[in-house]
Image (cartoon, helix red, strand yellow):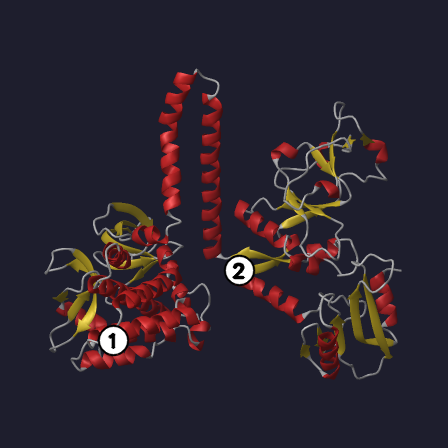
């Protein structure tokens, strides 16, 4: 009788009300061996709560006793070392500690944050073993030279993710080709140790491992042909988590249960995460190619004459060195801001770097404070566009609208912060994760980011009201807080600021051909490129945000791109003042110059930045 059948028989007349697990309590038995003590009560029509407790191995006895005593008084919930189940378990269900731990169940529920979850059987086929080491012993031999293929056992599946190379203990088998493994198959060691804190032991079959067949101590997972490499990688990494092992076992036995493995919920990435994973896979392949080129170059020159080899190494290695140096620059976050952040932010950051390279000065102080305000302004504008797409009102816009309607100054540092804080709130948290531009919702989500905003706002106010302090100290602190904000806004590097220079719609193909400029980095003069887009609801001469999926989101009238009348530089402008009924004054994010544009009055009313006429 199996363990689940025994539990089902017991459940006919008895109900478990307490289970206590402990290790290392039996003398002359290995300390990893776990003992379970169970209290049963005769079954009654009214179900009773089940308390499950695990005695920790390295904890003060008084602490454990207090926690256990508290658990006995509870009718639900969790303590440090145990928990209470209110609902009765199905007959035969495992009583393993991790199986029903609320913390484990919560981690399982959070898998949906990566996208949808599917049963493993929907994307992988679980294959029967190719050869049984006992029943098929007539097929086995020890001669690798004769016919046959290598037999891979559970011991050959390494936790590193690789298959161990053959050795003197390797067996070989004469089996038909249909039993053999293929490149991309995942091999799971079928026997595990309950005390092992890791997840399942999984390796992926490579071309160098073949020809080979799996022994019965290995579970073979063959991916569906539609799975992309990065999707297989995500599943493989998930199987290596302790959560996967907990869900695929009964928590007591040493064997992985194929039935549980088939039903194991595994994450499948949504479109945004799929795109990110595909980019990461492509980057890894490119780096592998560069490494192979470098190793190949070293090996080739060693076979040549020394003089020729030296010249070849210097000449051919130049490109590889330049690639490595360019890649190393990306570890410098300042370089990333200069080259990968939207133009207004990158432009301001370039000014900060130039001023900070000298002695402490008020010019450097102003550069830091203004860069922080421009960063918050730009992010707040993205938040406004996101809210407009979602059809959710930002209450903080009312304060901005009231000031503009009264002819007073336009949005301030505090206004931008208020917008960004509001979009972290409850009504925006309810929006789906695939909502366009939703990344901005998390910018001021942490206390560290909000504290940085508060300190910078204080410095900005002190500067405006001529309050002076220790310049060098304040500059260092303001600069460090700007770094905090820039680091928290790294999602902006994936939201490309683009300007559409031309839009041509093909009514027959239902495709628009766009010529655009990506305004990323600290230079406003950038080359154009052409792309196709599936919608004709686009404006030539307007700014857009291009998200990670290539979707375009209009920024007008929140942000416009035009030639500055003061300095003749192309710049981004947002509303600053409405001094008269027929005037709209815009201010540049790059340098603070102003210009007028009366044509934006009606669009600004439509998006709620000006009151309706």
Q: Image height check: is 142 above or below 281?
A: above
Residue carrying label 2: 115
Residue lying at the far top of the rendered structure? 305
Residue 350 shown left or right of residue 441 in the figure: left
Whichever of labels 1 and 2 marks the residue nearer the N terminus, that label is 2
Tell me the CA gap for discs 1 and 2. Answer: 44 Å
Q: Image height check: is 409 above or below 377?
A: below
Q: How dense is the environment of label 2, judged by Cα within 10 Å: few (below 14), some, or many (20 and up)? A: some
Instruction: Please tell me which residue is depicted at 61% across the width and 68% down the height of the picture.
Output: 106
| Numbered circle sitting on residue 79 | none
Instruction: Please tell me which residue is depicted at 75% across the width and 28% down the height of the picture.
Output: 148
**SS at mark 2?**
strand
Residue carrying label 1: 461
- Judge whether residue 612 can be spotted in this image: no
Q: Image height check: is 393 above or below 267?
A: below
Residue 495: x and y, percent?
35, 57
Q: How dense is the environment of label 1, judged by Cα within 10 Å: few (below 14), some, or many (20 and up)? A: few
**Front-most of residues 586 and 259:** 586
* Quarter of the rendering containing residue 134: top right
**SS at mark 1?**
helix
* Quarter of the rendering containing residue 402: bottom left
Instruction: Please tell me which residue is depicted at 40% across the width and 65% down the height of the picture.
Output: 438
On-image quarter of the N terminus: bottom right
Q: Nearer the viewer, mark 1 or mark 2?
A: 1
Instruction: Please tell me which residue is depicted at 15% across the width and 68% down the height of the picture.
Output: 599
Residue 427: x and y, percent?
43, 76
- Judge whether residue 499 can be spotted in this image: yes
Residue 338 shown left or right of residue 224 in the figure: left
């Amino acid at each position: 009788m199996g363990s689940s059948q025994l539990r089902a028989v017991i459940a006919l007349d008895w109900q478990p009300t307490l289970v206590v697990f402990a290790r290392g309590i039996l003398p002359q038995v290995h300390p990893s061996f776990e003992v379970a003590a169970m209290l049963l009560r005769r079954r009654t029509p009214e179900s009773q709560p089940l308390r499950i407790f695990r005695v920790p191995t390295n904890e003060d006895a008084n602490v454990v006793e207090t926690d256990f005593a508290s658990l006995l008084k509870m009718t639900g919930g969790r303590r440090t070392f145990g928990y209470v189940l209110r609902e009765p378990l199905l007959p035969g269900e495992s009583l393993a500690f991790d199986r029903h731990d609320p913390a484990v169940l919560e981690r399982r529920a959070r898998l949906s944050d990566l996208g949808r979850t599917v049963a493993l059987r929907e994307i992988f086929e679980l294959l029967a073993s190719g050869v049984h080491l006992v029943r098929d012993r007539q097929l086995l031999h020890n001669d690798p030279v004769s016919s046959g293929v290598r037999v891979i056992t559970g011991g050959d599946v390494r936790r590193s993710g690789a298959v161990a190379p053959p050795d003197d203990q390797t067996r070989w088998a004469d089996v038909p080709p249909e039993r053999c493994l293929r490149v991309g198959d995942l091999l799971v060691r079928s026997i595990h140790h309950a005390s092992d804190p890791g997840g399942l032991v999984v390796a992926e079959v490579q071309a160098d491992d073949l020809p080979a067949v799996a022994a019965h101590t290995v579970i073979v997972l063959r991916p569906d042909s539609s799975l992309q490499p990065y999707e297989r990688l995500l599943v493989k990494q998930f199987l290596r988590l302790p959560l996967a092992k907990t869900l695929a076992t009964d928590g007591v036995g040493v064997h992985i249960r194929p039935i549980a493995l088939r039903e194991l919920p595994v994450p499948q990435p949504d479109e945004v995460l799929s795109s990110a994973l595909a980019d990461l896979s492509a980057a890894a392949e490119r780096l592998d190619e560069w490494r192979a080129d470098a190793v190949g170059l070293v090996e080739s020159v060693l076979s040549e004459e020394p003089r020729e080899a030296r010249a070849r190494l210097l000449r051919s290695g130049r490109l590889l060195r330049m690639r490595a140096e360019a890649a190393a620059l990306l570890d410098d976050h300042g370089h990333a801001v200069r080259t990968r952040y939207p133009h207004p932010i990158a432009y301001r950051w370039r000014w900060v770097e130039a001023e900070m390279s000298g002695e402490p000065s008020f010019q450097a102080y102003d550069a830091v404070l203004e860069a922080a305000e421009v960063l918050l302004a730009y992010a707040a504008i993205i938040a406004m566009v996101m809210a407009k797409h979602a059809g959710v009102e930002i209450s903080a816009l009312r304060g901005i609208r009231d000031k503009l309607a009264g002819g007073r100054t336009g949005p301030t540092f505090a206004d931008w912060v208020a917008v960004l804080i509001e979009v972290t709130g409850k009504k925006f948290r309810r929006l789906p994760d695939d909502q366009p531009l939703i990344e901005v919702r998390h910018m001021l989500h942490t206390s560290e980011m909000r504290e940085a905003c508060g300190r910078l706002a204080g410095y900005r106010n002190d500067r405006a009201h001529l309050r002076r302090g220790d310049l060098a100290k304040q500059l260092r602190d303001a600069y460090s807080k700007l770094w905090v904000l820039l680091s928290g806004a790294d999602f902006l590097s994936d939201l490309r600021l683009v300007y559409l220079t031309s839009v041509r719609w093909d009514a027959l193909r239902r495709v628009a051909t766009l010529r655009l400029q990506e305004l990323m980095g600290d230079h406003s003069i950038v080359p154009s490129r052409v792309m196709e887009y599936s919608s004709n609801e686009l404006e030539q001469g307007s700014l857009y945000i291009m998200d990670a999926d290539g979707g375009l989101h209009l920024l007008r009238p929140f942000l416009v791109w035009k030639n500055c009348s003061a300095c003749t530089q192309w710049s981004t402008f947002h509303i600053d003042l409405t001094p008269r009924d027929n005037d709209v004054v815009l201010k540049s994010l790059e340098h603070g110059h102003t210009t007028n544009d009366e044509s934006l009055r009606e669009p600004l009313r439509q998006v709620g930045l000006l009151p309706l006429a």
